[in-house]
Amino acid sequence: MKLEPIKKQPLTLYTIGYATKPIDVFIEQLKKYSIDVVADIRSVPYSKVFHVYHKESIAAHLRSNHIRYVYLGEELGPRSKDDAHYDETHQVQFDRLMTSTLFHNGIDRLCSGFEKGFSIALMCAEKDPAICHRSLLVGYFLQHFSSIFESNNKILHIKHDGSLESQEHLEERLSDINDIKVDLFMSEEEQAKHAYRLQCEKTSYRKEES
């Protein structure tokens, strides 16, 4: 009898922003999607207003709900410590950051978690993933420059109300956000890239001049 090959389950990476969510709502949304690891990708893992989301506090809340916490802000955060990743206006350039060894180490750590069977959500602060590096940096890299998210694999953003938005839909939304009109001299792909660049210019971290 010929054995059928074992089919791998589709891979899903989630992202979530805590914004103004009460901690119980945040935990409930994680459980809704069976997430068992939260990867904190904030460069600064503390909140000036919502202290429950301080690194140590959120780790304790997650642990009490049988969810693991891992800090990946050094690798996948938006505030690079390398001056080469900034332009002349002191704004971080995600295309440069994506090429760094540290960033790729973070991606490798995510892959290791997937290989171990964990269901992972990237955590940051912003309410709308379209203004957050969880979509514009990490999600964009995985969607366009990585072989991980091929076939049926997905990147899904948990929105503030707990519903889901795919990385593909989010990137389509960038054209509306930036009021990109149909241009007969630009392909759809070029228009999408233009919308992405504009969004990064509007939202990416800029260092204060010393």
Image (cartoon, grey):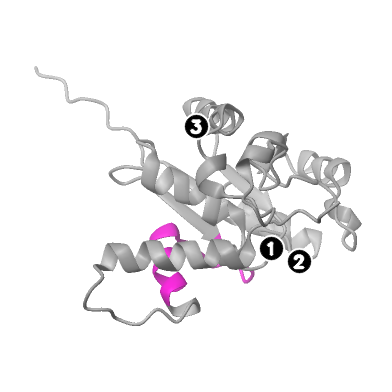
- Disc with the residue nearer the chain's start (3 vs 2): 2
Residue 121 versus residue 157 in the image, above or below = above
Element at badge 2?
loop
What's the CA distance linking mark 3 and mark 2? 27 Å
Give left or right: position of 175 versus 104: left
Q: Position of residue 129 (x, y in %)?
A: 58, 63
Numbered tag placed on residue 114 in the rendering = 3
The front one of 187 and 210 is 210
**Which residue is the site of mark 2?**
21
**Which residue is the site of mark 1?**
126
Residue 96 versus residue 136 in the image, above or below = above
> Would residue 161 be counted in the magenta stretch?
yes
**Among all residues in the image, which is located at the extreme left?**
1
Q: Is residue 88 visible?
A: yes
Q: Are marks 1 and 3 in contact (CB under 8 Å)?
A: no
Element at badge 1?
loop
The front one of 137 and 111 is 137
Residue 69 versus residue 191 in the image, above or below = above
Give left or right: position of 53 versus 14: right
| Residue shown at 64% from the left, 47% from the top | 86
- Disc with the residue nearer the chain's start (1 vs 3): 3
Identify the amino acid type marked 3. Phe
| Residue shown at 74% from the left, 65% from the top | 19
Q: What is the quadrant of the N terminus in the image?
A: top left
Q: Are marks 2 and 1 in contact (CB under 8 Å)?
A: no
Q: Which residues are magenta?
A: 158-175
Single out the mark in the foreground, 1 or 3: 1
The front one of 150 and 145 is 145
Element at badge 3?
helix
Identify the amino acid type marked 1. Glu
| Residue shown at 49% from the left, 50% from the top | 139
